[in-house]
Amino acid sequence: MKEILTYNFGEEKKLELIFTKTEEKVYAYNAVSYTHLDVYKRPIKVRVNRMKKQIKVVGAVIEKDGKILCAQRGQGKSLGGFWEFPGGKIEESETPQQALEREIKEELLCEVAIKNKIITASYEYDFGIVELTTFFCELISGEPKLTEHESIKWLPISELSSLEWAPADIPTIDCLVKGV
């Protein structure tokens, strides 16, 4: 991506920046000096603030026999090794509930009945801003099987804090511990 922005400060003074995107950084190059209007070509390394990607996701708080299902993200994935409530991204044409039902079938090969919403919380990661909505869910068909996660555990609410959770999931744990 290349974008040229020109700023005029009167007839003889202007600043021209050419923005170039490489990987995940945007730098500005080639500025015109104010006094002589000489063009020099060295990176000035100006990081341009740009809006981070908004990612809407859902998570299932699946309860069985007084314990909550916790899933550990695979090592090769973003946030690898962190624990989370299973779920995933909401596709454009889906409601949060439809997305959660689909994700649980794909990730755990089981079915859930979605109950009450717990919380919607946002967390800003390097790769974007994740907006996570969690729901209480009841297991109605099958037993969770590992397909994408490293491991799963069933823990009582009192032990959830013993795991290293993905930051976006922590507000849900706070709600569960407080009984909200």
Image (cartoon, grey):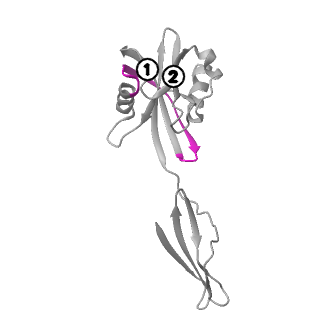
Marks 2 and 1, Cα distance to the nearest angstrom? 19 Å
Residue 120 % position (x, y) = 51, 34
- Crowd around label 2: few <14 · some 14–19 · many ≥20 (10 Å): some
Residue found 64% across the figure and 71% down from its top: 44
| Magenta-tinted stretch | 107-128
Residue found 62% across the figure and 88% down from its top: 37
Side of 151 relative to 109 (left or right): right
Residue found 51% across the figure and 41% down from its top: 130
**As displayed, is residue 18 above or below residue 157?**
below
Residue 17 % position (x, y) = 56, 75
Side of 120 relative to 45 (left or right): left
Residue 98 % position (x, y) = 34, 31
Q: Is residue 111 magenta?
A: yes
- Foreground residue among 89 and 121: 89
For the stretch drawn in magenta, the main secondary structure is strand
Identify the residue under disc 2. 151
Identify the residue under disc 1. 137
Checking the image for residue 78, the label placed there is none
